[in-house]
Amino acid sequence: MRGPLLFGASIVIAFAAWQFLSSFVFNPFLIPPPLVVFETAVPMVKSGEIFRHVAISLARVGVGFVTGCAAGIVLGVLLGRIRLVNELLDPVIELLRYLSPTAMIPIAVIWFGIGETSKYFLIFWGTFFIVLINTTAGVMRAPVIRQRAAECLGANQLQIFLLVVIPSAAPYIVTGMRIAMASSFMSIIPAEILAADSGIGYLLQMSSILLQTNRIFVALLTICVIGFIFDRLFRMAVDRMLSRYMSYIALT
Amino acid sequence: MLAVRNVTKVFGADANRYLALDGIDLEVSPGEFVCLLGPSGCGKSTLLNILAGFERPSGGSVEFEGAPVRGAGRDRVMFFQDAGSALLPWLSAEENVRFALRVRKLPRETWPAILDKYLAMVNLRDHRHKFPAQLSGGMRQRLQIARALAVEPKVLLMDEPFGALDALTRRRMHGFLLDIWQRTGTTIVFVTHDIAEAITLADRICIMSVGPGSRITEVIGVGLPRPRDPGEPDAARLFKRVEGLLMHDIAEVA
């Protein structure tokens, strides 16, 4: 009970401080107070404008994230399991991973235009490397003892791989996915600011051009809330479906 | 049953070349309890890994029931000190044993009876739904024993299995292991650096010298009746003798 109470208190105090600062310390046009932001948000919610932008951004994150995870896990497993693949690809990956999705925006626009594909690609790009690196690490760190124990019980290589190595790597893979999801929510914004005609990032960009600081704040708050909600949903799903693979980290 | 002839093991090459084992000869008879005893770094675990088939010898031969050892197999099950790593931590106690039955390809109808039998044998029937993380160190090792026995191995290879347990738990595990050994007739090769442990358990103690180039320097038959108490005069005398052999060897290096 103490946790949720403090969590609520933290939010309330932050809003109070915000209200105070923008009313008495800063220019309320530059930092619109919470009440103004709330008044701005109500019609945007009522008209469904905000949900339209959120839905579009979420769809982009969803497609890029799911395909990025799938590709990252498959290649990560190969990299972790087959030495030659690792030695051939690891140097390239170590270099490419420094190209953030933001750095890839200009070329993505040229390659794919400002339609949906460029956003899918950018989210995919960001997700792929994070999930890939974590999956590889997880597969490589599957305890040798555990694999040997299974081997001498009579497990064949496929069984060792599916029943021992992959579950051992699960915590790493899931952690990679969670980090990648946070990064996806961050990188969708610059992508939409620079190359989109819809989505939360586009809303930010348009509001900025029109000097509507109150609408900018609505968009910023929306990003916070959406990111937070999806991280919690992800954790709940993991707890429900994968807890037996996650809970033993403390042991080993 | 197990025949090791003139086995050598070399790790690395050139400047990093390390001769771990140098001419090991060992015969293990069916149903025998053999301890490999030696200080840390004497290659006991390397020899055990070779017996299990995880590693190939650089020279010499290892035969199991007359056929050369070419890889791991469930007739020779290895038992590890680090049960937390060796067990599958995402499976309950019962599921860990079931994993062994699954890879052994036994018909499903037979599983419940076998599960009951081995979980009862290691006194874990009441804890069958717990996960390894919820079990004590001794219970985890008992679970590992149950899982190993479930594939009905001919040889149990044990690599300092009780080294991480406290002294009292370790003594209980000794009694336990001897009981199971006598009931199942499994052959056991047991690696340890603990002289008292070797004397408590073994039919024969093979003393290994410090590496590089370890070899079996002495084989001692322990003719004492079981259960043995390391405090009894005969056992104590044997302890002194073994200790003397080991100290002599270590003194030459240190």
Image: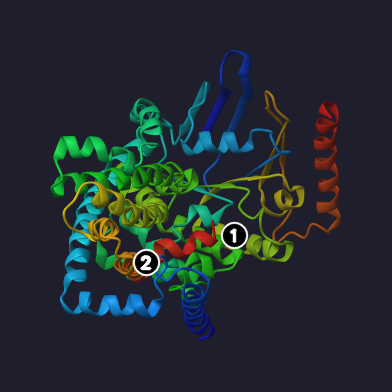
Q: Chain of mark 2?
A: A
Classify residue A202 as left or right of residue B57: left
Classify residue B167 as left or right of residue B80: right
Tell me the amino acid under the disc marked 2: Cys
Q: Chain of mark 1?
A: B
Question: Of B248 and A210, which appears nearest the observer?
Answer: A210
Question: Of A65 and A219, which appears nearest the observer?
Answer: A219
Question: Of A114 and A74, which appears nearest the observer?
Answer: A114
Return the x and y of residue B12 as percentages of the image width and height.
56, 21
- Numbered disc in front, either 1 or 2: 2
Q: Note whether A89 is above or below B150 in the view shown.
A: above
Element under label 2?
helix
Element under label 1?
helix
The crowding category of the residue bearing disc 2, from other C-alpha atoms within 10 Å (few below 14, some 14 to 19, many at least 20), is: few
At x 26%, y 51%, the residue is A193
Return the x and y of residue A135 as percentages of the image width and height.
37, 46
Tell me the amino acid under the disc marked 1: Leu
Question: Is circle 1 on the same chain as circle 2?
Answer: no
- Label number found at residue A224: 2
Return the x and y of residue B117 as percentages of the image width and height.
42, 69
In space, the residues marked 1 and 2 are separated at their CA atoms by 58 Å
- Label number found at residue B47: none
Q: Which residue is mark 1?
A: B177
Q: Tell me if I can see residue A156 in this picture.
A: no
